[in-house]
Image (spheres, grey):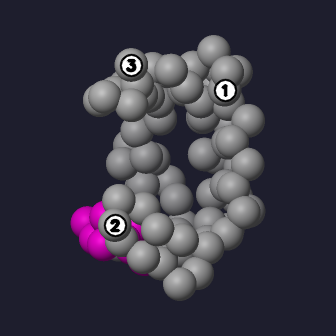
Amino acid sequence: MVFNELSYSEGCRLKVSGLASIREGLVLRDLVPRLSAFPGPATWSVRMQRASLTFPPSDAELVRTQLEPLLCPYGETRAGYCWGPEAA
């Protein structure tokens, strides 16, 4: 998998069924104290730099319940994420 000239030897399936409008999404940092995946809240951003980070089911449910009200249909929202010459 290659993103912006960076190559990754592993990947995962990703299904995008909805998007929050740009700049109106969930601020994960605000949930860190409530997420067990980040035992040391001061170093949460370092853990996010791992190739993959698995959330325990309770953490995934918390993020899902916070994010779902912000989601809009993918087809109606994706254009807001495009910028630069390829967006024209």
Q: Is residue 69 above or below residue 86?
A: above
Residue at 50% in and 20% down: 79
Residue at 43% in and 46% down: 28
How far separated are the C-alphas under marks 2 and 1? 26 Å
* Residue 58 in the figure: left or right of residue 35: right
* Residue 36 in the figure: left or right of residue 17: left
In the image shown, does 45 or 36 lie closer to the viewer? 45
Is 44 within the magenta?
yes
Asked which quadrant contains residue 36, the reply is: bottom right
Is 11 within the magenta?
no
Q: Amino acid at mark 1?
A: Tyr
**What residue range appears in magenta?**
41-50
Q: Nearer the viewer, mark 2 or mark 1?
A: 2
SS at mark 2 in the image? loop
In the image shown, does 14 or 67 lie closer to the viewer? 14
SS at mark 3 in the image? loop
Q: Main secondary structure of the magenta part?
A: helix
Q: Earlier in the sequence, mark 2 or mark 1?
A: 2
Instruction: Locate residue 47, reporting x and y percent.
Output: 39, 73
Q: Earlier in the sequence, mark 2 or mark 3?
A: 2
Residue at 26% in and 66% down: 42
SS at mark 1 in the image? helix
Q: Which residue is mark 1?
A: 74
Q: Would you say residue 39 is visible in this rendering?
A: no
Asked which quadrant contains residue 64, the reply is: top right
Q: Which quadrant of the rendered structure holds the C terminus?
A: top left
* Residue 29 in the figure: left or right of residue 61: left
Asked which quadrant contains residue 66, the reply is: top right
Instruction: Locate residue 83, reporting x and y percent.
Output: 34, 27
Q: Which residue is mark 2?
A: 5
Q: Which residue is mark 3?
A: 88
